């Protein structure tokens, strides 16, 4: 799974900004921390052979313990230098400023291994959370820094709500999928 995410984001402007020239050394630990932070909440969906993954924060994600979150980031923080940790903190703060107070689902990562793209895997791992959000009539949010991903999400009902700004970061779009009525 970490190989899938690291490979999928190898050319992503936001991840390049966050991990800088140390991308090859940090990407796997970064992906692992994002996974560990969410998997216990049951809001991660993975395709067969881990060639695609969707990592969400469900509306009740704030109930996870701060110790769990600290543990998830231990290995990354040991490898990352202070500059990478500062970039991540600034980016994370910008994301948290954009997130609404109201109940919502947040897509932290959607990744398909480059060798398995265009097979519907991203849509397949995305759909369970979209269905859950619809059943709860909750909005969904995410951020992306590539035009192709922005178009992918727009085809699934997301709309650009605003730009995310963090010092030195590339252009990042904050996107929202309004609350949907569950399908019958």
Image: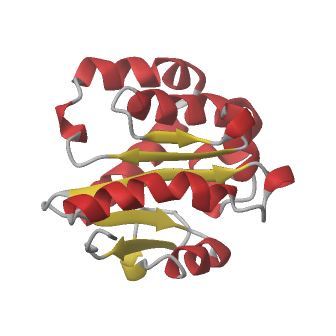
Q: Position of residue 66 (x, y in %)?
A: 24, 24
Q: Quadrant of residue 60?
A: top left
Quadrant location of residue 181? Answer: bottom left
Q: Position of residue 95 (x, y in %)?
A: 34, 58
Residue 70 rendering spot, x and y as whole percentages: 34, 22
Frontmost residue, 146 versus 36: 36
Closest to the observer: 5 or 177? 177
Give the number of marks: 0
Q: Is 121 placed left or right of 54 in the picture?
A: right
Quadrant (top left, top right, bottom left, bottom right) of the C terminus = bottom left
Q: Position of residue 160 (x, y in %)?
A: 41, 82
Position of residue 58 in the picture relative to residue 24 (left or right): left
Residue for point 35% across, 65% down:
141
Residue 22 seen by the camera: no
Q: Residue at x 81, y 53 (%)?
A: 116
Q: Residue furthest front?
A: 184
Q: Quadrant of the N terminus?
A: top right
The image shows residue 77, relative to residue 27, as above or below, that is above
In the image shown, does 39 or 168 lie closer to the viewer?
39
- Left or right of 89: which side holds 146? right
Q: Is residue 38 visible?
A: yes
State the residue at coordinates (76%, 48%). Answer: 113
Seen from this angle, which residue lies furthest right?
115
Q: Nearer the viewer, residue 6 or 153?
A: 153
In the rendered view, tell whether residue 119 sits above or below residue 24: below
């Amino acid at each position: 799974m970490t190989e899938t995410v690291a490979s999928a984001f190898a050319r992503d402007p936001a991840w390049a900004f966050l991990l800088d020239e140390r991308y090859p050394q940090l990407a796997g630990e970064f992906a692992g921390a994002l996974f560990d932070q969410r998997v216990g909440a049951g809001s991660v969906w993975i395709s067969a052979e881990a060639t695609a993954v969707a990592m969400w924060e469900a509306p009740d994600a704030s109930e996870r313990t701060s110790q769990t979150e600290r543990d998830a980031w231990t290995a990354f923080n040991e490898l990352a230098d202070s500059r990478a940790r500062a970039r991540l903190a600034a980016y994370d703060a910008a994301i948290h400023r954009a997130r609404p107070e109201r109940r919502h689902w947040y897509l932290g990562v959607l990744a398909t291994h480059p060798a398995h793209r265009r097979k519907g895997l991203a849509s397949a791992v995305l759909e369970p959370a979209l269905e859950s959000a619809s059943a709860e009539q909750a909005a969904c949010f995410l951020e992306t820094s590539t035009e192709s991903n922005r178009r992918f999400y727009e085809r699934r009902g997301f709309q650009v709500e605003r730009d995310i700004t963090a010092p030195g970061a590339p252009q990042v779009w904050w996107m929202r999928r309004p609350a949907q009525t569950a399908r019958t």
